[in-house]
């Protein structure tokens, strides 16, 4: 079939029980179901055709993954190509845009990363022949494993199953459903550090894991019964763990300001929790928000070469786009349109501020109150701190 685009839900997502969720996300954004879809299973030679320029080490991991289980092939119209590329997210989930498949479904490495999308419609036609030529399957039963696309979660589940140690500390549901991958990664990394310091029996394994020593961890795991996809996920995570390391916030903000000044586009400001941090309020920003009027957002989108999309939350919608810098997601957005019909406008008057390129205390209070930022609870606490700070300044 020619003049198509193609998406592949990979075996880790299939085994993780995410097929329907990922398809629903694709259909919602693209605006309808795919033209066709089918199960397929490809081998090592097919993987080499699929990734002809990949280094042997990573190709071996990918081949082992596709040899382990079925994948789901979806054929879409050629018009869906750009949306599919945007939806999949960066190859390494640490750099994936929020709202992309690889950011939403708890993947933490560049091999078990849930989905493959062809780079162009021309390549899609070639790759469709590869999957058409694979083993045709009538999949009746799949042995599911939870969160198998995450190496660090797979490792933590292994520790719990084999040694009875719960590194989630009873907070598994909270971490997985509320934290997101980056916060889950930070939480579990800290727990593994503490565990390695207080448990002599498994301290060596934990230390090898923390240092990213895939060979040493594999030597120890060889003694245990662990699923092959979990092994692939853990190994790929260890070989790419450094992608989760972030640069310092002050350096990232400094570099970002320099980059945006070079655009000569005016009217943007740093807002949200990063601005709270800049003003000296004790907080832990998870990303960096840039507020700007609609015409400035359009200009910055063109300057950055990134498409604008409509973000929908429980309470409001906003036009925005995201970029990654040194492990930090930077989200640019304009006016917030709330479900009750009210609008929080971002305009040049609102952004007048004696501190260059950072929203003022007054504006931050207005923003947090208008957005009813209640989760996490520290946000509202920070509004109170801001009010106290204003009173002390006066």
Image (cartoon, helix red, strand yellow):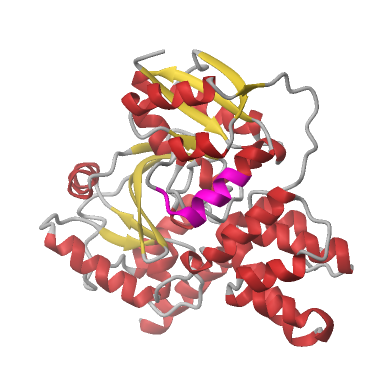
Instruction: Indicate the position of residue 39 as horizontal and vertical percent values.
Output: 63, 23
**How far across and how far down the image is residue 212, in percent?**
58, 72
Which residue is at the front of the view, 6 or 189?
6
Q: Residue furthest right?
A: 164
Q: Is residue 143 left or right of residue 385?
A: right
Name the residue at 89% across, 67% down: 164
Q: Is residue 100 above or below residue 212?
A: above
Q: Residue 307 is drawn in which quadrant?
A: top left
> What is the x, y in percent for residue 24?
58, 27
Q: Residue drawn 49% across and 69% down?
A: 242
**Residue in the foreground of this view, choosing between 231 and 147:** 231
- The answer to whether residue 376 of the structure is visible from this angle is no
- Identify which residue, 387 or 375, lies in the foreground: 375
Q: Which residues are magenta?
A: 54-64
Q: Is residue 198 placed above or below 186 in the rendered structure?
A: below
Prevailing SS of the magenta stretch:
helix
Q: Is residue 298 left or right of residue 245?
A: left
């Amino acid at each position: 079939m020619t003049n198509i685009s193609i998406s592949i839900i990979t075996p880790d997502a299939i085994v993780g029980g995410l097929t329907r969720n990922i398809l629903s996300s694709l259909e919602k954004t693209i605006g309808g179901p795919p033209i066709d879809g089918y199960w397929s299973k490809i081998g090592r030679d097919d993987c080499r055709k699929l990734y002809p320029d990949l280094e042997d080490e990573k190709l071996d991991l990918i081949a082992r993954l596709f040899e382990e289980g079925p994948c789901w092939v979806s054929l879409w119209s050629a018009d869906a190509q750009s949306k599919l590329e945007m939806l999949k997210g960066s190859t390494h989930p640490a750099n994936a845009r929020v709202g992309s498949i690889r950011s939403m479904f708890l993947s933490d490495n560049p091999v078990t990363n849930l989905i493959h999308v062809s780079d162009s419609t021309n390549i899609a036609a070639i790759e469709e022949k590869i999957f058409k030529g694979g083993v045709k399957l009538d999949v009746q039963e799949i042995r599911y494993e939870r969160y198998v696309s995450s190496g660090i979660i797979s490792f933590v589940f292994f520790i719990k199953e084999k040694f009875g140690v719960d590194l989630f500390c009873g907070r598994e549901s909270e971490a997985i459903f509320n934290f997101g991958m980056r916060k889950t990664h930070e939480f579990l990394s800290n727990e593994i550090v503490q565990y390695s310091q207080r448990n002599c029996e498994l301290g060596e394994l934990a230390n090898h894991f923390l240092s990213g020593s895939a060979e040493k961890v594999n030597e120890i795991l060889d003694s245990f019964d662990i699923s092959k996809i979990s092994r692939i996920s853990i190994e790929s995570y260890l070989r790419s763990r450094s992608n989760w390391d972030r640069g310092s916030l002050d350096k990232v903000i400094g570099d970002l300001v320099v980059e945006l000044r070079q655009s000569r586009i005016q009217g943007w400001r740093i807002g949200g929790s990063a601005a709270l941090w800049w003003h000296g309020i004790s907080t832990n920003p998870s990303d960096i928000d840039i507020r700007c009027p609609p015409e400035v957002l359009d200009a910055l989108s063109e300057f950055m070469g990134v498409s604008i999309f409509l973000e929908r939350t429980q309470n409001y919608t906003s036009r925005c786009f995201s970029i990654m810098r040194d492990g930090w997601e930077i989200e640019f957005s304009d006016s917030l349109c709330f479900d009750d019909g009210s609008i929080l406008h971002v305009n040049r008057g609102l952004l007048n501020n004696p501190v260059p390129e950072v929203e003022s205390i007054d504006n931050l209070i207005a923003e947090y109150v208008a957005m009813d930022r209640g989760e996490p609870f520290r946000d509202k606490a920070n509004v109170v701190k801001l009010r106290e700070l204003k009173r002390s300044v006066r």
